[in-house]
Structures are given as structure tokens and as C-alpha cells.
Amino acid sequence: MYKVIKFKRYYLVANTKGEYKNHTHINVHSRTGEKEYKICKTLISIINDKRVPKSNYLLQSAIRLTLDEEYKHNLLEIQKRRKQRYFNSQKGVRR
């Protein structure tokens, strides 16, 4: 179960079955914060369905929130692969 709490500048999403480390922040940039609240709800839905977020930030957030070790391991592997695809646009060289 997840809890979404709004503060002035961010939403706190916490896994209530987990420990303190099982939480993440979603910064509020819009005036009302509705867009960011929908992002929080989408993130929770992604985790419940065991899908992979497209955003690297949401991927890291999903890793922090989930308690499912197999799903977490899969997300960590995907995160490693994404980091390996670094592209230096100035020189046009893949690293």
C-alpha cells in the first residue's frame, strides 16, 4: 500500500509496508500540482503492474518504493543498461 502526501514543493510517495528508505519525492513545478499528483498515481500503478518506467527518475523511484526483490533486481539491471548507453553529443562518440 502506498501513501501520497503533499507538501508545498513536492509530493512524498511512501510504501507503508516498507521502511523509511522506501519513499521518494516528486517535485511540484505546476501551479496546482495536479500534474505531479497524476505522476505519483501513475508511478504507483506502474509498480503494482510490475512495468518499467520510461523516465530514469521514475525508474529510480520505483526501485526505492518496491518491496518485491525480483522486480527490484530487474529494474536495477535495466538501470545499468540505460547508464551504459551514454552518448557524448559533442564528439559523436558512444561510450
Image (cartoon, rainbow, N blue to C red):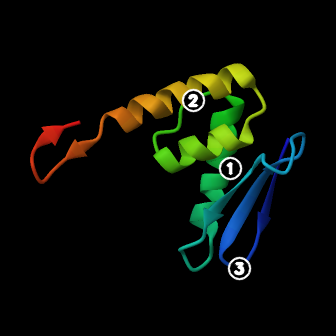
Where, by quadrant of the figure, is residue 59 drawn? top right
Which disc is residue 8 wearing?
3
Above-or-below relation of 33 to 59: below
Q: Residues within 10 Å of mark 1 (few under 14, many from 20)?
A: some
Q: Amino acid at mark 1?
A: Lys
Please tell me whether mark 3 sits on a helix, a strand or a loop: loop
Above-or-below relation of 67 to 60: above
Cα distance in 3D space between marks 2 and 3:
30 Å
Which disc is residue 26 wearing?
none
Q: Amino acid at mark 3?
A: Lys
Above-or-below relation of 84 to 73: below
Q: Residues within 10 Å of mark 2 (few under 14, many from 20)?
A: many
Residue at 63% over, 61% down: 26
Where, by quadrant of the figure, is residue 36 drawn? bottom right
Question: x and y percent of residue 83 in the render?
Answer: 39, 38
Please tell me whether mark 2 sits on a helix, a strand or a loop: helix
Residue at 46% over, 31% down: 80
Cα distance in 3D space between marks 1 and 2:
19 Å
Question: x and y percent of residue 40 in the render?
Answer: 66, 53
Mark 1, residue position = 41
Q: Amino acid at mark 2?
A: Leu
Question: x and y percent of residue 72 in the render?
Answer: 66, 28
Residue 81 versus residue 47: which sits nearer the camera? Answer: 81
The outermost residue toward the front is 95
Residue 77 versus residue 56: which sits nearer the camera? Answer: 77
Q: Earlier in the sequence, mark 1 or mark 2?
A: 1
Cα distance in 3D space between marks 1 and 3:
18 Å
Relative side of 84 to 56, left or right: left
Above-or-below relation of 83 to 36: above
Mark 2, residue position = 75
